Image (cartoon, grey):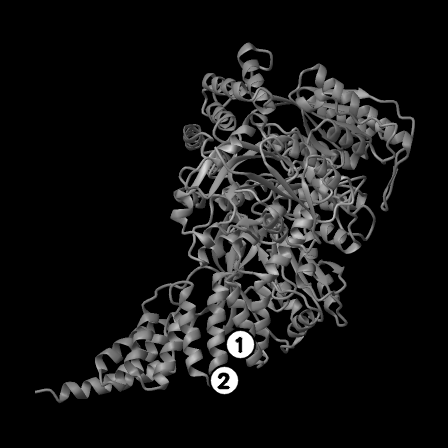
Amino acid sequence: MSGKLSLCMIVRNEERHIGRCLQSVKDAVDEIIVVDTGSTDRTPDICRSFGATVIEYGWNDDFAAARNAGIERATGDWILWLDSDEEVAKEDRAALREALVPSDNLLYAVCTIHYYEDEPKPELAYRLAQHRLFRNGCGLRFQGTIHETLNVLELFPPEEAEARTGMLPVKVYHYGYMRSVAAELGKGERNRRLLELQRERDDANPWTYYHLASEYYREGLYEQAFQHVNMAIVRFITKQLAPPSLLYKLKYAVLLATGSGEGGWPSIEKAIELYPDYVDLHYFKGLILYGKAMYAEALDTFGRCLELGEGNIRHLTMAGAGSFLALYYAALCLEKLGTPGEAESRLREALGLYPQFESAKEALDRLERGTTGFASTSHKEGDRMSRRILAASPVHQKSAILKLFLESLAGLDRDGLEVDYLFFDDNEEEASRRLLEAFAERQDGVTIVKEQQVHAYIKDESTHYWNDTLVDKVASMKDRIIEHALERGYDALFLIDSDLLVHPDTLLRLDGTGKSIVSNIFWTCWQPNTSELPQVWMMDEYSFVRQSRRKALTDEEANRKAAQFLELMRTPGVYEVGGLGACTLIRKEALEKGVRFRRLPNVSFWGEDRHFCIRAAALGIGLYVDTRKPAYHIYRDSDIEGAIRFKRSIEKGDTPGIGISLCMIVKNEERSLERCLQSVQGIADEIVVVDTGSTDRTKEIALQFQAKVYDFAWTDDFSAARNYAFGQATEPYILWLDADDVLEQPDREKFIALKRELDPKADSVMMDYHLMFDSAGKPTVSLKRNRLVKRSCGFRWIGVVHEYLEVAGHVIHSDIAVTHRKDKTYTDRNLRIYRRKAEQGETFSPRDQYYYANELKDHSYVEEAVVQYDIFLKTKQGWVEDQIAACLKLADCYGRMYERDHQLQALFRSMEYDRPRAECCCRLGALFMAENRLQQAIYWYETAASLGEPPRSGALIDHAAWTWLPLLQLCVLYDKLGQTDKAYECNERALRFRPDHPSMLYNKKYFQEKLAKQEEGRP
């Protein structure tokens, strides 16, 4: 063995970690080069104590440059690079020097183990082979300002690089993404800032988008994570490269984290086709199938995970995906399939691999109790044992509210659950005490503990008035409830306040999350005339922002993060939070660890829920919220009316069909609003009108239709206004319209039938939107819109102008049409908004870039529009239909500029995205027809006529181009060529679409006469 090994590192303020790292390799390397980028602590001194050469380097937001500065100083034949929050496994240190054995290798990979929870446990980690040693002097250098990588593929063809890469039997432990370490170092903020700078410099780099997605994922910003990982995938495909496996892993991890796993089916199959040996993708597939109740298929998939194992660390591999986690979920599948004996066997195997696996312990305990009779003998789904849950509440409540609460509680679905009830009766009203007693008579398993009413609890239309004595009393009652649950061996405790109404599936849904502590979200206006806020938070008493101790956020950053958190809470899913309360499922293991509500004597936070959450965090128990079906909070007497509507909306069989809230935003619409509202009579059960500044009779007209009218200060943001309107709705479904929209009578009748018959599993109903009409009133231009959406899905509007409703899930297509009857003059309002944002230096999303170009075109700024369309198309982002439409509109602009070649190029460019559209083919036909190139024109009109039905994607449809127009033009072209039979046939086909079209009727007569004369002239 010969040669010299240099360790190269970059550091800054790493005094807590650097000693551990250097200690792990000091006897294995010959030289230590440390580039210090500005430490203000003892880091440089610690490095020198290990004999390191410390190079001071001015930080320039470029990790690759700093690493390369260290490489330049290295004198070794080989270079090992590490980060200060890493260490080499003790047993593997000698193996590092195997790289010095003479060989043709240029690089060596090692197994990196990345811990991600609070403790460095091998069961809570990811494993990945990474290049960590490379030959000095062969030109290898780092690239990328952040998440830097070696430029291997720039120097060597992939085949040669793979052939000259060895694998060392060395493990490197990485602690930097453990929660406590990452929060302490403030890595997330730093990384995102540098990645955003890198994106500005090189927007086409897919790795930048992947690493941004990873940062968003770690912060729980799943919507942004999903958007960016998809952008990364698209950029790899655009470069004609296969997206690396870890992109697909992140994509499906995001979907599962938000409770949207079904959205990954069946697309995950395509990812597995690319990477059939990637166990994590098979594991995610199993979770998706399990969530779809396809238990046999899921069982097979988890079996495949066990076959693959976790040895292939060419992919980022999660511990457990091919071992204890797969065994655990295989057991759950077997339990669902009615074979508890096999399920127990799998659980024991899982616990043999990971003895601290709490979920497996709980599942095994449940199955064992089912066979030994320690719990109820009630069985469901074969031999599966019912879980015992205690639903409990301290009750000091007005009878009108308590009645609604108890009805909601009694309506909870309990499939597979045995539910008992415990109430601490602290009521003042005798009527409320009687309601509890009546509930106990109707329900089994009810215990009522009488409390002595000593201190008055006051609430009014403004707020609830708490004091220390009342808070301590509630905390005491809740802690006594916990003791009751523990003494009687319940599997979980459901603590719910007595002024809440919940969906029937709430208990099953919360229990199904598998979380030790999870709350169902609800929203409350804590003060009159304020925005609704959730009962969950991220930090301290009630902060929606997680702060780093090392770096304070600016007000702007804090406000942005708070807005992101609230937006996330409106997105259906299950998310980790810092605080919660009021509607919470607490599993037995959390109760046994010691979570309690009593006041912590050295903490001044207000409210027993804060003290409960602090204890949970100290005990290492995560807090989660389920946002999929918000509960309803009766915070004031005035909320009772909404509570009744909420109750009615989820009752089964009381009223036919679904309840609908119509949500609108208006300003000075007195000419059209009445017509719109009349057209939805008998359809909308509630009308919400958000007025953004009317000075005419708009609000008066709305009130005549019993609308709820809200004033909203206009901020040049349509989405903000629409989301506010959606936030006021209380019915299960929301219909949105503009004031100049109307439901014509045939569509009214269809809508009433839909309301009566709609499958309640539908998340959205897509309807036609007719925009332009011919002289007979028939639509010539229309598109599709998600017009009726389920309120509990929490769909949100996006975009300040030309906003769109982001919808997912089960979408139904309907032939109902909303008709747009524009009777106001078009203005440049939208263009002014876009110009103002451009002048302020705001970066447009791809969609806004497209609509900015549209506004410019519509206002005849065609040269500017050309520039903006080109910018949009070069992003290679956005909806494919917008990209196609942008090409067509770009062609129209070039046509108005008399640039025929560019016009032709733009039309052909539209076909890069999908099959030809009839609108494009007709434009090409018209272009060649104008140049008297008849055969070319015929080709394109024939193509348009043969395309069939337009895509049902929701894109703008020119009905003429997809039906009669190409046929009519073919009629003219064939007539010019003297092919009268073909011309007549095309005209006849066109007449089937427009039997009363005057030009076609004229043509019919013309061709009949012409053909008759031809017949007469034949011998």
Name the residue located 54 percent from the left edge and 55 percent from the top edge: 752
**SS at circle 1:** helix
- Residue 586 versus residue 811 in the image, above or below: above
Question: Does 687 appear above or below 24?
Answer: below
Amino acid, disc 1:
Val
Which residue lies at the image location 50% right of the left edge and 28% below the top edge? 329
**Is 584 on the left or on the right of 755, as rendered?**
right
Up-down relation of residue 975 to residue 540 (above or below): below
The residue carrying pointer 2 sits among few (fewer than 14), some (14 to 19) or many (20 or more) residues within 10 Å by Cα, namely few
Name the secondary structure under disc 2: loop
x, y (%) of residue 835?
Answer: 66, 73
Looking at the picture, how far across and down is residue 877, in whole percent? 52, 61
* Foreground residue among 352 and 971: 352
**Spatial separation of the CA atoms under disc 1 and disc 2:** 10 Å
Residue underneath mark 2: 897
Residue 730 x/y as whole percent? 68, 48
Hey, which residue is sitting farthest front in the picture? 2
- Mark 1 touches mark 2? (CB < 8 Å): yes
Q: Residues within 10 Å of mark 1 (few under 14, many from 20)?
A: many
Task: Confirm whether residue 464 shows in the render.
Answer: yes
Residue at the extreme top of the image, as rendered: 372
Front residue of this view, candidates 206 and 982? 206
Q: Residue at x 67, y 16 (%)?
A: 489
Residue under pointer 1: 866
Query: Going by the image, does 151 lie left or right of 837?
Result: left
Horizontal and vertical percent position of residue 1019: 7, 87
Of the pair 24 and 394, the residue shown nearer to us: 24
